[in-house]
Image: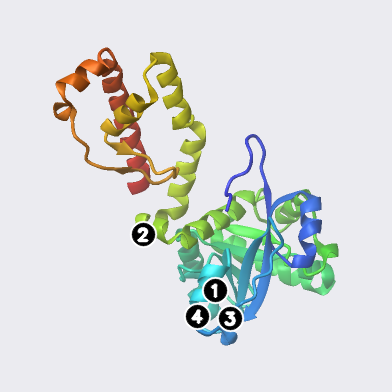
């Protein structure tokens, strides 16, 4: 899953629409589209096998309608959908969904009191709260319910972590990103909600990556991923640096590979995870080998120090 827009531009995200509305969402200018599958919490079981149907280039999402303080997610749901959302229809269901680490988005499905502590718990673990505007377009009498829900969320979350999705089952009810931004401003939310939508996708990717989830503390997943991806985009590719230095020094490719191994650092092609292994130091190199390297030893020592500095900085990003 790609989690950042291109250089110099922002990709807008439509977090909730039907498969019939995907083409219209792309035509309106959305860079990422999430196809919604709606199920009842009572229908979930260990034998539950969802049919995930998402067009090529779109992401899949399951929205679980919950009305009680208990939610058991089967393995099929956790592994087959890109985004997991819960539509809470009661205060107890809302509080439970906000505290569930497997839930990426919490949507309002009814009129009930919103607990500020539950909202803060959802924001602390990187989750987002969602409002859908398509029902208000389809049924004008639902506009006041949308305005009231937005006011309650804006007060509880203080404008943070709230996303505005369409929830459209018909392409006619989709609106372009500028119109959605104006609607968010009218509802008392932040005009630019795109960062929160990308936050949902980043958190969903971290949840699906079991290995990454073991490395990162749950509360810092989004922050660490954002910082690591930003640094990875700012730094030039390591392979290009190595090739440039090899061509400048004139050293054979085999010697360059050996020198890289002697640095004691093995890269993992991941912008987030770096690992180190213990390798022999210079005392383990034979005198013939040392003479063969000749004037390249000074270059290798400087390269070692540079790679060690890069490794220490990356390790601070992962652990911190």
Q: Are marks 1 and 4 in contact (CB under 8 Å)?
A: no
Mark number for residue 71? 4
**Left or right of 45, for residue 287:** left
| Cα distance in 3D space between marks 2 and 4 | 23 Å
Q: CA distance from mark 1 to mark 4?
A: 12 Å
CA–CA distance between discs 1 and 2? 20 Å
Q: Marks 3 and 4: which is nearer the front?
A: 4
**Residue at the spot x=45%, y=61% of the render?**
125
> In this picture, is 296 found above or below 108?
above
3 and 4 marks in contact (CB < 8 Å):
no
Residue beneath the point at 36% across and 46% down: 318
Which SS class for mark 1?
A: helix
Q: Residue at x 50, y 32 (%)?
A: 234
Which tag, 1 or 2, sits closer to the chain's start?
Answer: 1
Q: Earlier in the sequence, mark 3 or mark 4?
A: 4
Residue 90 circle label: 3
Residue at numbered disc 2: 214
Identify the mark nearer the N-term, 2 or 4: 4
Tell me the CA gap for discs 3 and 2: 33 Å
Q: Which residue is mark 1?
A: 77
């Amino acid at each position: 899953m790609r989690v950042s827009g291109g250089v110099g531009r922002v990709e807008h995200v439509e977090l909730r629409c039907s498969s019939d509305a995907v083409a219209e969402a792309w035509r309106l200018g959305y860079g990422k589209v999430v196809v919604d599958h709606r199920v009842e919490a009572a229908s979930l079981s260990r034998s539950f096998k969802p049919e995930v149907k998402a067009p090529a280039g779109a992401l899949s999402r399951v929205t679980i309608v919950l009305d009680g303080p208990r939610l058991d997610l089967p393995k099929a749901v956790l592994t087959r959908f890109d985004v997991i959302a819960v539509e809470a229809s009661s205060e107890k269901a809302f509080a439970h969904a906000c505290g569930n680490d497997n839930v990426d988005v919490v949507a309002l499905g009814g009129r009930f009191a919103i607990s500020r502590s539950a909202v803060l718990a959802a924001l602390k673990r990187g989750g987002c709260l969602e409002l859908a505007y398509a029902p208000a377009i389809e049924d004008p009498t639902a506009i006041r319910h949308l305005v009231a829900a937005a006011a309650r969320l804006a007060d509880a979350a203080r404008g943070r972590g709230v996303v505005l999705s369409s929830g459209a089952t018909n392409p006619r009810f989709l609106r372009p990103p500028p119109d959605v931004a104006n609607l968010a401003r009218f509802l008392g939310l932040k005009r630019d909600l795109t960062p929160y939508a990308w936050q949902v996708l980043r958190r969903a990717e971290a949840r699906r990556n079991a290995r990454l989830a073991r490395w990162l503390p749950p509360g810092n997943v989004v922050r660490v991923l954002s910082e690591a991806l930003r640094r990875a985009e700012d730094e030039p590719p390591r392979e290009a640096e190595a090739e440039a230095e090899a061509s400048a020094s004139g050293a054979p490719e085999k010697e360059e590979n050996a020198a890289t191994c002697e640095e004691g650092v093995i890269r993992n092609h991941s912008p987030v995870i770096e690992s180190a292994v213990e390798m022999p130091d210079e005392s383990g190199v034979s005198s013939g080998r040392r003479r063969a390297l000749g004037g390249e030893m000074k270059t290798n020592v400087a390269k070692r120090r540079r790679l060690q500095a890069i490794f220490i900085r990356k390790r601070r990003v992962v652990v911190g």
